[in-house]
Amino acid sequence: MSAGSVSKLDLVLSLKGKATLGLELKRHLAPKTVGGVIRSIPVEGNAHMMGNSIAYVDTAIKTGGEKLRTQFKKGDVGFLATNGAICFFVDDVPVTKPMTLIGKITSNLEELRNVKPGDIFAITQAGT
């Protein structure tokens, strides 16, 4: 998956035709959830926004929540088990539905502010 740590997995989040962002998932944050996401790579789907603070992609990933929380910081990556959404936090924000923290956006976070209806997110392994 990634050179370096077994716990830290370097991925690429693409906003197709617009931008590429660095994405890092961390197994120690939620081993079962991160494992489910990794087994589903590549992930692709419509990009959505919740207000101006959260970009997300719906997935078919089925896994329960781990270490659920309702506070997230700018750059965090969360997983919403109720609908399998992977969420990318553009700002510090509280959420009403508890989510699992699974990683961080490591580069180009501000590009998520440009998500528009019809955009496509793709999550792939780094270097592919």
Image (cartoon, helix red, strand yellow):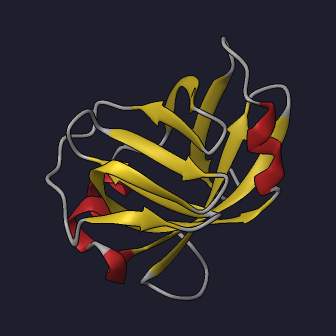
- In the drawing, does residue 13 fall left or right of residue 6? right
Which x, y percent locates residue 59?
36, 32
The answer to which of 121 and 100 lies nearer the viewer is 100
- In the drawing, does residue 60 fall left or right of residue 91? left
The image quarter in which residue 99 lies = bottom left
Q: Is residue 121 above or below residue 104?
A: above
Q: Is residue 102 above or below residue 78?
A: below
Which x, y percent locates residue 15?
73, 34
Q: Return the residue found at the far top.
A: 118
Q: Is residue 61 above or below residue 66?
A: above
Which x, y percent locates residue 122?
60, 35
Q: Residue at x 66, y 11 (%)?
A: 118
Q: Is residue 127 above or below residue 10?
A: above
The answer to which of 84 and 75 lies nearer the viewer is 75
Q: How many marks?
A: 0
Which x, y percent locates residue 110?
82, 51
- In the drawing, does residue 27 fall left or right of residue 83? right
Q: Residue at x 59, y 33 (%)?
A: 51
Q: Return the residue found at the far left.
A: 64
Q: Residue at x 71, y 40 (%)?
A: 14
